Image (cartoon, helix red, strand yellow):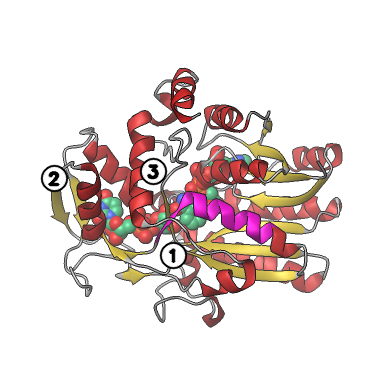
Amino acid sequence: MGKTTLITGGAGYIGSHTTLALINAGKKVLVLDNLCNSCRESLVRLEYLTRTRVDFIEGDIRNTNLLDDIFSRYDIDAVVHFAGLKSVEESVRKPLDYYANNVVGTLNLCHAMARSEVFKLVFSSSAMVYGTPRQIPIIEDLGTGKPINPYGRTKLLIEELLTDLCLSDPQWRIAVLRYFNPIGAHESGLIGENPNGRPNNLLPCLTRVAMRQVPELMVYGGDYPTADGTCVRDYVHVVDLADGHLKALQALQSRNGIHAWNLGTGIGYSVLQIIRSFEDMTGITIPLRFAPRRAGDIAECWADPSKAERDLGWYAQRDLMQMIIDTWRWQMRNPHGYRSQPGLLASIALKQWV
Ligand code: NAD
Ligand code: UD1
């Protein structure tokens, strides 16, 4: 079966979908996750879906001894690195946690990789590194901007760290994947986004209103200079994103140095368009209320994903309808995420799926 791919943060939202894609592509994987924003159940469900045991180590990327131990015990040839904290709002309140987890964690990981002579890395970056975009659609080659919050700044710092690393040693092969707005879930409804605490992102907030767990959806700002006054984003299906990691790993076989790719659809939808599409597809009315603009939101942001298509042969295959259907299926089957009915629900859902 060959060498192992280490997946940090592989129990999380994008990590679990990518772990599934890698296993389905015949790769041997090892997941390292401290479960600070995920749970073991996502991996149990991956085992259901793949009929494969998923090797898992519960641990922290800030633990250098653990990293050295992992690289010495497993025959690892590449790392797909998701582990990190991702809440913009929390990063403003707890910047030290964000710099420690994201920047120091990545630094430790790269150190351990270098010590073990593992030089292939796929890193989860974000469209946040562009700051307020100078032009839309956003192309990679225009360079990064000024992220407006600590979370975004950790991503930019890491990109710079990785660039310096590649300049220092030509053995490194690094893919920086800049995600736009990941939504959706695997079509089985078995794995999906499972935010701890109160969600901030549009789709998790919207589905909670649809489930009547929350009375109404706040629409942050109706006075933006967009067609209907609400913000426009590039929503991309998490299964397409997962496929992008597989393609990036393949691309690194034949190229060294650092390469950044936008992973988005190239299509922007406004908040109201998302709400109306959800209502049309599910028949559920979403009560909403306009609220003041959310601090830090930009009016419009979508990708030019043509570099990924050119270099990786990747493009998003799933449309907004698919994203909404899959998000809703996941939410219906797991009204309280993985805490709904661990194990039991997975087996029921699996019977419907196979
Ligand atoms: P997630 O929180 O679901 O997954 C991150 C995983 O990393 C979790 O399982 C968490 O337990 C683990 N983790 C966190 N800190 C760790 C540490 N120090 N050691 C070991 N494990 C640790 O988030 P996600 O949405 O799957 O995001 C994955 C990556 O993609 C993150 O780096 C995030 O910043 C980036 N990203 C996410 C989005 C998004 O909208 N979801 C957008 C752009 C970039
Ligand atoms: C946010 C994060 C970004 C992250 C991305 C994907 C911020 C400022 N940025 O981006 O770091 O990469 O998620 O996870 O948080 N909205 C509402 N009502 C809601 C929730 C959201 O109107 O209840 C609006 C927002 O104002 C925004 C749009 O929906 O205009 C999308 O919001 P969200 O899903 O949080 O994504 P981003 O803000 O683009």
Q: Amino acid at mark 3?
A: Asp
Mark 1 highlights which residue? 265
Viewer-proximal residue among 150 and 227: 227
Viewer-proximal residue among 244 and 64: 244
Q: Residue at x 58, y 31 (%)?
A: 43
Give x and y (percent) for residue 319: 38, 57
Q: Nearer the viewer, mark 2 or mark 1?
A: 1
Q: Is residue 195 left or right of residue 76?
A: left
Number of numbered markers:
3
Any part of residue 351 in sight? yes
Viewer-proximal residue among 81 and 342: 342
Residue at mark 2 to residue at mark 3: CA–CA distance = 21 Å
In the image, is residue 148 part of the stretch drawn in magenta? no
Mark 3 highlights which residue? 326
Mark 2 highlights which residue? 287
Beta carbon of the mark 2 residue lies under 8 A of ligand 2: no
Provide the residue span drawn in magenta: 235-249
Residue at mark 2 to residue at mark 1: CA–CA distance = 28 Å
Q: Secondary structure at mark 1?
A: loop
